[in-house]
Structures are given as structure tokens and as C-alpha cells.
Amino acid sequence: MNYFDSAKNKALWEKELSTLRGERDRRKLEGYKPQKEKEAEKSVEKNPYRRKITLKELEEIEKRESGRTREGKSAKPRRERNREKQAPELEAPTGNS
């Protein structure tokens, strides 16, 4: 228990215990009250980098960005796209060696 040998660490621990004791006493009197939905929404609203969107809007954004359908299938299979890219580069062998 070397942690408590330091006066600083002991003071920090006592401070933490006092807050926990206070919370325990409050819960004995009032009962457990989880964070309300309105408070949770306020925290989201305060963040300027977040905005609420529907699932449909999100799917449309993802579809535009990736070119994939909802099921995750590409519009063209990867092999087809690779063949199209490689076809002009490759020449057919003539057979006469």
C-alpha cells in the first residue's frame, strides 16, 4: 500500500471517497436517477460538429460516397472492374512462336 505513503495521494483518495460518500447518501434519500434524455440531447446539441440525421439520410450519403447498395454489394463486381482496367494493356498472344 505504498500509494498511501504519500500525503498527496492520501489527500486525493480522501477527496474521492468524500464525493462517493456524498453520492451514496444522496441515493439513499432520493433513489437512483439516471441521466435524463433531455440532458443527453443537450450535450449532443452543444457539439457543433454533430447534427441529427435519419437512417435513410445516412444510407443515401453512404450510397453516394461508396457506390454500393444497402446490402453491401458493389454496382459492378471487383473482378469486372479489374478486367476493364487491364484489358487495353494486355495483348492477345499470337500463337506463332
Image (cartoon, helix red, strand yellow):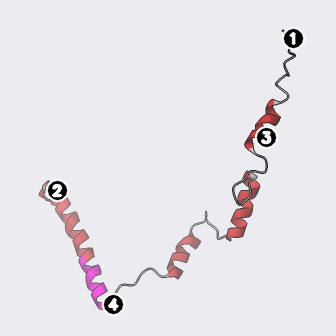
Q: Nearer the viewer, mark 3 or mark 1?
A: 1
Asked if disc 2 and disc 4 are in contact, CB closer than 8 Å, the reply is no
- Near mark 2 (Cα within 10 A), the count class, few <14, some 14-19 or many ≥20, is few
Asked if disc 3 and disc 2 are in contact, CB closer than 8 Å, the reply is no
Q: Nearer the viewer, mark 3 or mark 4?
A: 3
Give the CA distance from mark 4 to mark 1: 93 Å
Q: In the image, is residue 89 above or below residue 20? A: above
Q: Earlier in the sequence, mark 3 or mark 1?
A: 3
- Near mark 1 (Cα within 10 A), the count class, few <14, some 14-19 or many ≥20, is few
Magenta region:
21-30
Give the CA distance from mark 3 to mark 1: 29 Å
Mark drawn on residue 80 = 3
In the image, taking residue 73 as reference, residue 88 lies left or right, namely right
Q: Which residue is mark 4?
A: 30
- Near mark 3 (Cα within 10 A), the count class, few <14, some 14-19 or many ≥20, is few
**Front in this rendered view, residue 56 or 35:** 56
Q: Which residue is mark 1?
A: 96
Looking at the image, the residue that sits furthest to the bottom is 29
Q: Label 1 is placed on what type of residue?
A: Asn
Q: Nearer the viewer, mark 3 or mark 2?
A: 3
Give the CA distance from mark 2 to mark 4: 34 Å
Q: Which residue is mark 2?
A: 3
